[in-house]
Amino acid sequence: MLAALLFLGIFSFFAFTASTADIRAPIRPPLKPLHILTLTTFAPSGRPDSYPTNSAVNISASDPNSMTVIACATTWPVFEYATVWNRINPCSESSGATKNSKWTFQLLTPTASGQGASPLWNFRVHFVHETEKGIYVATGKFGVDDGNLSGLCSASGVCSFVLKGDNVTVPLYRLER
Ligand SMILES: *[C@@H]1O[C@H](CO)[C@@H](O)[C@H](O)[C@H]1NC(C)=O
Ligand SMILES: *[C@@H]1O[C@H](CO)[C@@H](O)[C@H](O)[C@H]1NC(C)=O
Ligand SMILES: *[C@@H]1O[C@H](CO)[C@@H](O)[C@H](O)[C@H]1NC(C)=O
């Protein structure tokens, strides 16, 4: 009898919470987007006597949610483009650094097929912020043809591109565990 009552009690408790959860499910505080402050890409000519010898992508961004400003940079030997894709690179927190907070970024090809990909003028950037509260991710697409990168490659083979436009933001999401 007691067991039956308990069972009923538990059952109605779950029934109640389930229906409340259904109503409340969509409520989750929205995250503010990540602001891309600067983004530059560079490739040297690749001539034997040229300096520097590495290509580079440099990004700085500010996260209004965690109040951090990050600097993300990666380099790769000129012509060795294949090594840059999907590699997980650390970002440093130049301000607002907090304990147990870690930012990383990856350069991804613009589409799954990777067609037209260049880490200099057509790519995606995937940011990950690991904190005690959870993991947050943001993926932004950048390209000359998209209109948010501008620059050129000179006849000598030196390439240089920069972020175009003010207030460029990338939506930030919290990963569900
Ligand atoms: C890119 O970042 C690296 C490492 O932080 C730095 O040495 C280099 O000067 C930066 N390049 C540009 C163009 O900002
Ligand atoms: C860059 O432009 C493309 C095309 O308009 C857009 O899809 C993409 O979201 C833009 N990237 C950012 C970071 O705003
Ligand atoms: C930046 O863009 C966001 C969203 O598009 C907008 O809410 C905000 O007012 C803009 N900020 C500035 C300084 O233009």
Image (spheres, helix red, strand yellow):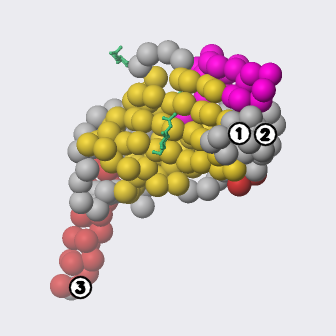
> Label 1 to label 2, Cα distance in Å?
5 Å
SS for callout 2: loop
Which residue position holds label 1?
A: 50
**Residue at the front extreme, as displayed:** 49
Residue at 78% in and 44% down: 48
Real-space CA distance between mark 2 and mark 3, rounded to the nearest whole angstrom: 82 Å
Q: Which residue is mark 3?
A: 3
Quadrant where the N terminus sits is bottom left
Instruction: Describe residue 73's horizontal placement relative to residue 87 as left or right.
Output: left
Question: In the displayed structure, does residue 72 sit left or right of residue 98?
Answer: right
Residue 22 is a magenta residue: no
Residue 46 place in picture, x, y as percent: 76, 40
Residue at the spot 60% in from the left edge and 22% down from the top edge: 149
Tell me where residue 59 appears, x and y as whole percent: 48, 36
Residue in front for this viewpoint, 140 or 50:
50
Q: Amino acid at mark 3?
A: Ala
Q: Residues within 10 Å of mark 1 (few under 14, many from 20)?
A: few
Question: Is residue 37 left or right of 82 when viewed as pictured?
Answer: left
Q: Earlier in the sequence, mark 2 or mark 3?
A: 3
Viewer-proximal residue, 101 or 71?
A: 71
Say which residue appears at 71% left-offset and 29% top-offset.
Answer: 158
Of circles 2 and 3, the one toward us is: 2
The residue tagged 2 is 47
Q: Is residue 86 above or below residue 142?
A: below
Quadrant where the C terminus is found in the figure: bottom left
User: Which SS class for mark 3?
Assistant: helix
Q: Quadrant of ligand 3?
A: top left
When asked about the image quadrant of residue 173, the answer is: top left
